[in-house]
Amino acid sequence: MAYLLLLPAMVIFGVFSFYPFFRNFKLMLYETPPVPGLPSRYVGLHQIIPTITSTQFTQSLVTTFVFVILVVPISLILGLALAVAAHRRLKGVGVYRMIFSSTVVSSVAVASVIFGTLLNPVVGLLPWLGINPTPPALESTTWALPAVAVITIWQFLGLSFIIMSAGLSSVPDELLEAARIDGASAWTRFWRMTVPLLSPTIFFAVIVSTIYAFQAFGAIDILIGSQNAVRLHTNVLIYNIVNTLQIENNPGAAAIMATVLFLIMLGLTILQMRLLERRVSYAR
Amino acid sequence: MPADDHGRRRPRRRLRTIGSYALLTAFAIIILFPIYVTIVNSLLPPDQLVRQPPPLVPTNPQWHDYTTAWTSGGMSKYMATSAIMTAIIVIGQVVTSILAAYAFAFLRFPFKRTLFVICLATLMIPLEVTFITNLDTITSLHWFNSYAGLSIPFLATGFGIFLLRQAFLQIPRDLQEAAQLDGYGHLRFMTRVAVPLARPSLAALGVFSFLGAWNQYLWPLVSTGGTTPLDTVQIGLKELIGTQVTQIPVSLAGAVIAFVPLVILLLIFQKQLVRSLTAGAVK
């Protein structure tokens, strides 16, 4: 009976999660032949080093890290600021909370259309504001990645706000009230009490946003495209994997890079669990 | 409290309240501004779109770009595809999660713990790793560029199983025993008692699945090959993005159309959405 109930889920997991996960390791050992149509050749571990030391891969790794550093701190600080601002007993604060969480439902394609137009050099506000870089932001080697980061930050802001708000509501009000009566200023209360009490939430948000940023590539695909991604320093890891598979037709190299990505994400998840464990031991 | 103190505090408090509202409103305007400009621009004729300064209110709203996006822009097709794919995924995830979560919550069987850990382990395997092989799998099953290929890989979710198991475990043991005495079998207990009692969690899972499925980008992109009759809204928008100024309002109208179902989702299910999104955060 129990196994029958588990069967549907287990079949899906087996075929579409575990099988591809393990087959990835096998793919890493096979090299795609230079001429299409020939069978792939077993090369063992020999293509791993050349793949992960290739300029294209190391550059995409650097791009990804820069992207993550651009996205994570800003979206978390903004999310926290919004959460603190909305953490008040005011009439109508529910409407503001709704607005602040609204970007959580935006998709990458919608966000790309919105910001693609805002950044358009002919239409939109930039020319009116006198900000008219040549080449336009999305065609510039300097500004393309920050522009994509802005889109990702805006998209992540809703989730950042929701996570921070949930954390804030678990901070006991009586504690802050007592500190206020004792004469602690709002500034002191925020840095000495709210932030430390919120640290588990902040850690969680850091991990979630980092994983989110590592997986982001839709805006680059839509607004920059595979032809320009490398030239404009926007070839993030995921995009490199997708293009290696789809354009270069090289599953072996794609599998190697996907494994690197998996290891990075695994590391982050383990870190998150460690931190959560520590938090539990603090609580007791 | 002395009267004069009272009198001094009130205006200060009111000032602070006004300040709070001002801050909240400022934040709200910044967040909504890009959406607002998008809606305004989607209603502008092309000649006004490039005007300086840009008009911030559509004086003469033009709806024909919405018609264009919906018909020749293909948004009606994309929306239908996304709706069908999303419906399959949401229903599938809810059903498989109920069945598996029920087993984990109410039944005893060998390897229960191991199997539960296996379910949770799927959360650690990202799509970015599995899509390489999954593409081969759906191709060999002749599911490439089909609803089956779009949705079947997502018909089960470790998150859903986890969430519903938690909900089922809240159901008192006495209730289960009472139902057993009344001659309820597992199937009847599941459909008449467990599922109705777990409704809040089911709603949270449903909303979460909807959001994830509707907004997917990577898998619909690679599993249909792009530019096919089976493009979802997200992939369709990519094709709609115009390079010429005259096409811009059409793609903006398309974005608004794609965004509307999600705004409705947010308005109705905000609580459930927040619940599911923070399920991992606050434990």
Image: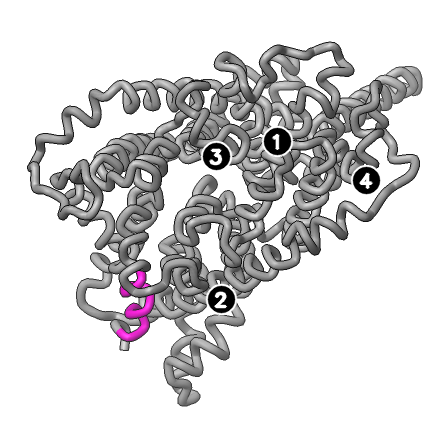
Foreground tag (3 vs 1) = 3
Real-space CA distance between mark 2 and mark 3, rounded to the nearest whole angstrom: 30 Å
Q: Where is residue A8 in the image (x, y as percent from the top left)?
A: 32, 69
**Quadrant location of the N terminus of chain B in the rendered image:** top right
In this rendering, the count of numbered labels is: 4
| Mark seen at residue B91 | 2
**In this rendering, would A143 be left or right of B63?**
left
> Closer to the camera, A184 or B207?
B207
> Closer to the camera, A233 or B161?
A233
Quarter of the view holding residue A54: top left
Tell which residue pokes out farthest to the bottom in this image. Answer: B183
Q: What residue type is labelled 3?
A: Asp
Real-space CA distance between mark 2 and mark 4, rounded to the nearest whole angstrom: 36 Å
Q: Is residue A99 above or below residue B145?
A: above
Q: Position of residue B36 (x, y in %)?
A: 76, 34
> Closer to the camera, B14 or A44?
A44
Same-subunit check for callouts 3 and 4: no
Give yes or no for contact between labels 3 and 4 (Cβ–Cβ under 8 Å): no
| Mark seen at residue A221 | 3
Q: Is residue B139 above or below residue A106?
A: below
Q: Which residue lies at the image location 42% right of the left edge and 50% below the top edge?
A: B225
Q: Is residue B250 above or below residue B244?
A: below
Real-space CA distance between mark 3 and mark 1, rounded to the nearest whole angstrom: 45 Å
Q: In this view, does B215 lie above or below B199?
A: above
Q: Give the range drawn in magenta.
A: A4-13
Earlier sequence position, callout 2 versus callout 4 = 4
Q: Where is residue B140 in the image (x, y as percent from the top left)?
A: 27, 61
Q: How crowded is mark 3: few (under 14 residues within 10 Å), some or many (20 or more)?
A: many
Real-space CA distance between mark 1 and mark 2, rounded to the nearest whole angstrom: 41 Å
Q: Where does label 4 land, which residue?
A: B43
Q: Where does label 1 land, which residue?
A: A173
**In this rendering, would B5 be left or right of B251?**
right
